[in-house]
Image (spheres, rainbow, N blue to C red):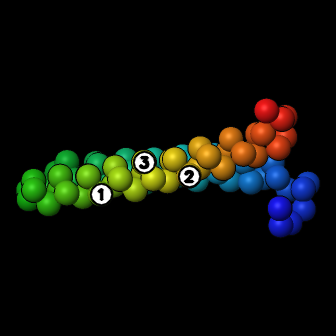
Amino acid sequence: MIGSRLAISDVGVAAAACDTAAKGAAMNVYINTKSMKDRSYAEDLNRKTDDLVNETSEICTKVYAEVKKVLIGG
């Protein structure tokens, strides 16, 4: 581990916040693509957004779980 062990809980909070931020940003994409006339392009943007959110959420979930393991064991 690099850094202070005292900051590990901050890493867990950051992972949770990052997951929420990615999902919130996706909502902004979805509301905008909903009104786009070029439906093919809109659906492509939605798919790309889904992929990015899923990837981000997976990473954030793993980081959060690792932090939790350090904090309470498991």
Give the quadrant of the N terminus.
Answer: bottom right
Q: Is mark 1 on a helix, strand or loop?
A: helix
Kindly identify which residue carries mark 2.
59
Number of marks: 3
Q: Which of marks 3 and 2 is nearer the N terminus?
A: 3
Residue 54: which numbered mark, if any?
A: 3
Classed neighbour count for the residue bearing mark 3: other residues with Cα under 10 Å, few (<14), some (14–19), many (≥20): some
Residue ID at (74%, 54%): 11
What's the residue at 59%, 49% (across, down)? 60
**Category of crowding for the residue at label 1, using alpha-carbon neighbours closer than 10 angstroms: few (below 14), some (14–19), many (at least 20):** few
In the rendered image, the vertical position of residue 65 relative to residue 51, given as above or below: above
Q: Give the class, few, some or many, for how many residues have Cα within 10 Å of label 2's Cα (few <14, many ≥20).
A: some
Q: Which of 68 and 16 is in front in this view?
A: 68
Q: Give the farthest residue toward the front.
A: 74
Report if residue 13 is visible in the image: no
From what the image shows, is residue 74 above or below residue 24? above
The residue that appears at 82% across and 52% down in the rendered structure is 8
- Amino acid beneath label 1: Lys
| Secondary structure of the residue carrying numbered label 3 | helix
Q: Is there any visible trace of residue 2 in the rendered image? A: yes
What is the C-alpha distance between the residues marked 3 and 1?
A: 10 Å
**Circle 2 — which element?**
helix
Q: Nearer the viewer, residue 14 or 8?
A: 8
Q: Name the residue under label 1.
A: 48
> In the image, residue 12 lies at what x, y percent?
72, 48
Left or right? Give the position of 40 relative to 2: left
